[in-house]
Amino acid sequence: MSRPAYLALAGVVIAVIAIALNFLVDGEKPVDGEPVVAGQSGSATSPSAPAAEKPDGVSTPTAAPPGQSAEDGPANKAVPIQPSFDVVRVNPQGDVVIAGRAAPNAEVTIRQGDTVLGTVRADDRGEWVFVPKTPLSPGSRELSLSARGAGGTIIASKRNVVVVVPEKGKD
């Protein structure tokens, strides 16, 4: 076997191991306040988190007591779906593709600190994709999400993503 064939085989083996580990580790809960580096994935919901109302009116998901489903709760309210990042891809030129999940038909807002990068509507399955019109400038930044559902409630993501755009090389 030639060297390129060995390298290709090694790449396939590594990819299979990574996929297997992803399925095994997928059930872990995120740590509050811990940013996610682009390329890592988190769960779309975190129903074990207690309800919390922040001063700006942003709330986090609630969970039903053990042995009781969210639909059987006090007011028969479903557990809100927390917005999450699924994919964040950035190339050396700063072009970005961001995709994730939220409540179906929710308005998802992508922010860099207090600056809104853009807003997009989730489809009927709760999936959304955002591609900014202009590339990001070089440097690092932390992106966060919030989603406004049909009832007007705003739910913030618990996990952020750190994106790094490299400095352009000098020619």
Image (cartoon, rainbow, N blue to C red):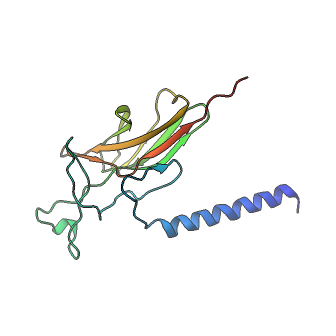
**Left or right: 111, with 26 as reference point:** left
Front-most of residues 99 and 61 = 61
Which residue is farthest left?
A: 75
Q: Quadrant of the C terminus?
A: top right
The residue closer to the viewer here, 73 or 38, is 38
Return the x and y of residue 85 as percentages of the image width and height: 43, 49
Q: Residue at x 61, y 30 (%)?
A: 167
Residue 131, x across and y down, in percent: 47, 35
State which quadrant residue 168 falls in.
top right
Looking at the picture, how far across and down is residue 160, in whole percent?
41, 47
Spot occupied by residue 3 in the image (x, y as percentages of width and height):
86, 57
User: Residue at (29%, 63%) from the top-left corner?
Assistant: 47
**Residue furthest bottom in the image:** 67
| Residue 46 drawn above or below residue 96 | below
Please, is residue 12 above or below residue 126 in the view?
Answer: below
The quarter of the picture where residue 71 lies is bottom left
Name the one closer to the observer, 35 or 86: 35
The furthest residue to the top: 171
* Residue drawn 50% across the image and 39% down it: 97
Position of the N terminus, as image quadrant, is bottom right
Q: How many marks?
A: 0
Please name whichever residue, 75 or 168, is drawn nearer the observer in this view of the structure: 168
Query: With 137 as the anchor, is 4 left or right in this view?
Result: right
Q: Residue at x 70, y 61 (%)?
A: 12
Quadrant of the image occupied by residue 58: top left
